[in-house]
Amino acid sequence: MVETLTPDICVIGGGAAGLSVAAGAAAFGVPVVLVERSRMGGDCLNYGCVPSKALIAAAKHAQAIRKATEFGVSAGEPIIDYARLRARIHSVIEGIAPHDSVDRFTGLGVKVIEDAARFLDERTVAAGDHLIRARRFVIATGSSPAVPPIHGLAETPFLTNETLFELKRLPEHLVIIGAGPVGLEMAQAYRRLGSRVTVIESSAALSREDPELAAIALAEIRAEGTLLLERTMIHSVEQATRGIRLLCETGKGRFHVEGSDLLLAAGRAPSHASLDLDAAGIRQDAGRIKLGADLRTSNRRVYAIGDAAGGLQFTHAASYHARLVLQQILFRLPAHEARDIVPRVTFMDPELAQVGLTEQEAREKSGSADVVRWDFSGNDRARTDGLGRGLIKIVVGRRGRILGAGIAGAGAGEMINLWAFAITNRLTLKHFRGYVAPYPTVSEIGKQASISYYAPMARNRLVRSVIRMLRCFG
Ligand SMILES: Cc1cc2nc3c(=O)[nH]c(=O)nc-3n(C[C@H](O)[C@H](O)[C@H](O)COP(=O)(O)OP(=O)(O)OC[C@H]3O[C@@H](n4cnc5c(N)ncnc54)[C@H](O)[C@@H]3O)c2cc1C
Ligand SMILES: NC(=O)c1ccc[n+]([C@@H]2O[C@H](COP(=O)([O-])OP(=O)(O)OC[C@H]3O[C@@H](n4cnc5c(N)ncnc54)[C@H](O)[C@@H]3O)[C@@H](O)[C@H]2O)c1
């Protein structure tokens, strides 16, 4: 028997984006139906942020043991119990899962349908035994690992983020296609756990990042022994007796790369193919949903958010999108995506964090860029703790307005919070110069950089003569 539901909002996809919309709408007592075809929590909880950060945490411990000798503490080469490590990753997922579960959302007042959704027409979605005719629809169907058109790949076993954390043994030699955030975070983690790692990248590693900052993180990756092959084309891949074999080419010629396991980290593809967007009058452009800055599709009843929106692909961007559509649906207030306030962090060690404009983007926008820098070597805490190389770059506009901030270094992901706050609230470097930072902390670099921005003022003739004049008053 088919049941027809008529909620205010129908959300398709129970990942970070969809769950945020459903929870937000339910909090205001708005009837909402959530359709999820697979695991609640989506990529972030099950195959993305959570397992990857738990793996990185284990690798960090291994590396800390190795580095301890520098501090006069010797512990020898770490022994990796991969079964235990893997069990911990899954117990971390299980610990968070109740927060995203069907039970919790049902308790919040959300009607959850565990099935695949597809549009029948502009106002109707079918999911299992249900027809949903909602006032508004939110597509939050996320993305899946992109599979590049490499000869032989379809016949060769490979891992993706959806299968990597199920692996029951430490790869002996992990070959990774793609040097973006997924590829490099996993490369460093597995290298630190003891695997040999080769990363093959067709263009430049971390090509979207400020090259000066990216170079700091990439130098560490290389120093730890990951082989990073940039500007390398992969012609073909095949299964070999003891793993996989790739035929590659650079400007210098062709060569083979052999490894025990292959991980695809070559970007993402939207997962909306089975939604039948045409039936709903939702237009696409080269496989991506066409969207306005208000995240509305060409069908004005339908929004697309999170990875499905095809722009910023982060969990925090997904919940930001959710807020923007809730503002429009519940309160009828206009809302537009502002990408410059959304930070991004690549959790390599040292971490790489950015919010707002990079130096290059500022130059492209206005022909020049005023950039303030501060090196970690000028920070006492970075020295006491042996944090290694690090740099903050702040892009400054008129009257000291902060337009962008990028940090490469230990703890960059935590530190960027403050700069994201500053950019969202249109603060200036004056605000950073004026607050009192606790000593010794690494976050002080922001204040140190801000003071350096105003340092030329101390040499200003007018300022000096005012000080001289004020002396006359005793
Ligand atoms: C390895 C890895 C590490 C990452 N690390 C970070 C990180 O550290 N920080 C960060 O901010 N981001 C990180 N990301 C990115 C982050 O995971 C995504 O941006 C985020 O999960 C997107 O959420 P979403 O809700 O848009 O999509 P998803 O989480 O993909 O959720 C979409 C949901 O829709 C469901 N669905 C799809 N089609 C249908 C249908 N027809 N009917 C019903 N349900 C459907 C799917 O089953 C899925 O559950 C990482 C990604 C990867 C791959
Ligand atoms: N810390 C984080 O916030 C975090 C971590 C992981 C992933 N993510 C998100 O997930 C998304 C996907 O990450 P990703 O690293 O998979 O994608 P990406 O698009 O950032 O990087 C993929 C890389 O693979 C390369 N590539 C593509 N095809 C190739 C081929 N045939 N041969 C060699 N190289 C090839 C590309 O040039 C690119 O550099 C990102 O957009 C990011 O937002 C975020």
Image (cartoon, grey):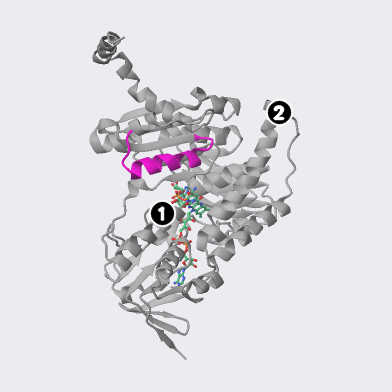
Label 2, on which residue? Answer: 69
Q: Amino acid at mark 2?
A: Thr
Stretch in magenta:
409-428
**Residue at (42% x, 65% y) in the render:** 24
Q: Position of residue 369 (x, y in %)?
A: 29, 31
Q: Callout 2 environment at 10 Å: few (<14), some (14 to 19), or many (20+)?
A: few
Disc ID at residue 317: 1
* Most foreground residue, 75 or 382: 382
Question: Is 79 drawn above or below residue 289 in the view shown?
Answer: above
Is the CB of mark 2 within 8 Å of ligand 2?
no
View extreme (bottom): residue:
1
Q: Amino acid at mark 1?
A: Ala
Q: Position of residue 163 (x, y in %)?
A: 59, 59
Say if the magenta span includes residue 322. no
Q: Position of residue 454 (x, y in %)?
A: 33, 23
Visible in this render: residue 100?
yes
Is the CB of mark 1 within 8 Å of ligand 1?
yes
**Label 2 residue SS:** helix
Q: Callout 1 environment at 10 Å: few (<14), some (14 to 19), or many (20+)?
A: many
Disc ID at residue 466: none
* Most foreground residue, 354 or 401: 401
Say if the magenta span includes residue 419. yes
